[in-house]
């Protein structure tokens, strides 16, 4: 399938249609590559595809399927999902942590304003901002810069290694009889990485528990500790230390690279389309003015910026191939028999570029999402299957609401606060837009840019 399987699988659609069946080793893999087919799997047959297939990453890194992302569909998963939706990502929880995001975005803005004549690696700075905001929301501390956890640098290298390992095609996942041999050494690397992660997360958990769960603290870990030992569903289900560490691992790994790469792709597209950048800046100046920074309360009043972000999600979805699902029972989709145990992949990248759904699908056109546009009513929250960057159905990204807020606030801030020039005199039309495929869709070349402040000096103070 090559280094960019989402692209090669899309090419196959023209010959074989939007429902592909592949035999990878001993595993039946079906790939949904159109809105209609994805809707059959993830809405009509959603409960049948609500579990994940066995994989070495979930086994060796994610606490042997005791996390939210890879846990089998059932009682424990429902408990973890309920905890996430009620206690971690509810409207109240997000509102309580709004000041944290605002403060970290402010620190990020000051860092950009200090760049002067030096080019900056935008993704790197955005990533630091996102990790610090997540760190404060989740464990009550920053991971980089002033007030940072001293173990942060090691943590960053662990996340980088995990994302790299997650993108490896592991032979043992597809030929189970060879799994014990670990022919590529992937399982051994995962076990070593898990030990490092577990040591980091265990020490943070122990520090919080020594101080005692503080009901007044707003970080997620304090909330999770306060829930330990409680009968959460009336069926005796209680939260364990292992599940708490697995949840923290999920939040850090799922929320960092995806957010930073999305902002980076958006700025790259805006640099290539100066007329769209100009319209977005004009809207921000009209709503926010030029004497204060953007706040989260401004976001609902920025329809053009929202359209820009949707269009970026369409062309550059953070996960071009969805995390895999597995068929609990045999079923029929579009007249085809899908055997029990089949792995389902949804080609989110292909669906969002389907010419049957989108006019001029390869062009960056935010207007399509504005009133009167072809997709004015389409959103990214899993109900409109032509655009599902966060997935859909029961296993849709649990942190969607937090991720969306962070991406919108960061994008609004960099568009409002700065004009942008490419480093080394590169002309916008010559900007390399190639992808480097991993589990998330990164740019092949980091976006090196000169930020030029465009607002009053007090905004960057």
Image (cartoon, rainbow, N blue to C red):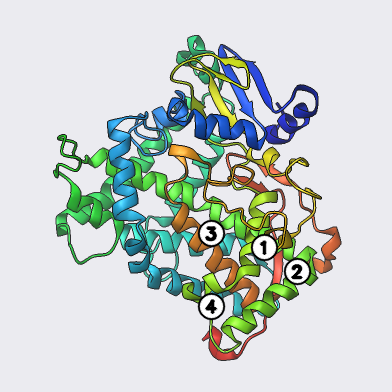
Marks 3 and 1 sit apart, C-alpha to C-alpha, by 20 Å
Residue 32 position, x and y percent, is: 63, 30
Q: Which residue is mark 4?
A: 294
Q: Tell me how far mark 2 sits from mark 4, CA to CA.
A: 19 Å
Residue 150 appears in view:
yes
- Element under label 2? helix
Give the numbered dot on residue 127.
Answer: 3
Mark 3 and mark 4 lie on one chain; the one further toward the N terminus is 3
Q: Earlier in the sequence, mark 3 or mark 2?
A: 3
| Number of numbered callouts drawn | 4
Residues at discs 2 and 1 in contact (Cβ within 8 Å): yes
**Mark 1 vs 4, N-terminal side:** 4
Circle 3 or circle 4, nearest the eye: 4
Quadrant assignment, res 145: bottom left
Q: Is residue 144 left or right of residue 6?
A: left
Q: Which residue is mark 1?
A: 308
User: Which label was assigned to residue 276?
Assistant: 2
**Within 10 Å of the Cα at label 2, are there few (<14), some (14-19), or many (20+) other Cα atoms?**
many
Q: Position of residue 269 (x, y in %)?
A: 73, 60
Q: Is residue 114 visible?
A: no
Of the pair 166 and 46, the residue shown nearer to us: 46
Figure quadrant of residue 76? top left
């Amino acid at each position: 399938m090559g280094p960019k399987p989402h692209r090669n699988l899309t090419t196959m659609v023209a010959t074989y249609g939007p429902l592909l069946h592949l035999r990878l080793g001993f595993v039946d893999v079906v790939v949904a590559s159109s809105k209609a087919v994805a809707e059959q799997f993830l809405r009509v047959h959603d409960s049948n595809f609500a579990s994940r297939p066995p994989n070495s990453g979930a086994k060796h890194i994610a606490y042997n399927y005791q996390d939210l992302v890879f846990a089998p569909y059932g009682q424990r998963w429902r408990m973890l999902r309920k905890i996430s939706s009620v206690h971690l990502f509810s409207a109240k929880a997000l509102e309580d942590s709004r000041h944290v995001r605002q403060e970290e975005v402010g620190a990020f803005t000051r860092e950009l304003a200090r760049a002067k004549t030096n080019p900056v690696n935008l993704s790197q700075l955005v990533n630091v901002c996102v990790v610090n905001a997540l760190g404060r929301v989740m464990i009550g501390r920053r991971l980089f810069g002033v007030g940072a956890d001293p173990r942060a640098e090691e943590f960053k290298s662990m996340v980088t290694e995990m994302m790299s390992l997650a993108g490896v095609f592991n032979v043992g996942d597809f030929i189970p009889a060879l799994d014990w041999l670990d022919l590529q050494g992937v399982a051994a690397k995962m076990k070593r990485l898990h030990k490092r992660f577990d040591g980091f997360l265990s020490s943070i958990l122990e520090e919080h528990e020594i101080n005692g769960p503080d009901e007044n603290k707003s970080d997620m870990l304090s909330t999770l500790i306060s829930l330990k030992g409680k009968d959460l569903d009336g069926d005796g289900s209680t939260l364990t230390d292992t599940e708490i560490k697995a949840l923290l691992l999920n939040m850090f790994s799922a929320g960092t690279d995806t957010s930073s790469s999305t902002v980076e792709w958006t700025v790259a597209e805006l640099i290539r389309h100066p007329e769209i950048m100009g319209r977005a800046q004009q809207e921000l100046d009209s709503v926010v003015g030029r004497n204060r920074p953007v706040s989260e309360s401004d976001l609902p009043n920025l329809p053009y910026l929202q359209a820009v972000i949707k269009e970026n999600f369409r062309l550059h979805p953070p996960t071009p191939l969805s995390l895999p699902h597995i068929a609990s029972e045999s079923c029929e989709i579009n007249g085809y028999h899908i055997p029990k145990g089949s792995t389902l992949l949804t080609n989110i990248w292909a669906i969002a570029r389907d010419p049957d759904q989108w006019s001029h699908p390869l062009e960056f056109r935010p207007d399509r999402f504005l009133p009167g546009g072809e997709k004015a009513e389409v959103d990214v929250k899993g109900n409109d299957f032509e655009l599902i960057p966060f997935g859909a159905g029961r296993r849709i990204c649990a942190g969607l609401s937090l991720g969306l807020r962070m991406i919108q606030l960061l994008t609004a801030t960099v568009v409002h606060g700065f004009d942008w020039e490419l480093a080394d005199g590169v002309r916008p039309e010559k900007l390399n837009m190639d992808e480097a495929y991993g589990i998330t869709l990164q740019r092949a070349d980091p976006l090196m840019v000169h930020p030029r402040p465009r607002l009053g000096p007090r905004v960057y103070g």
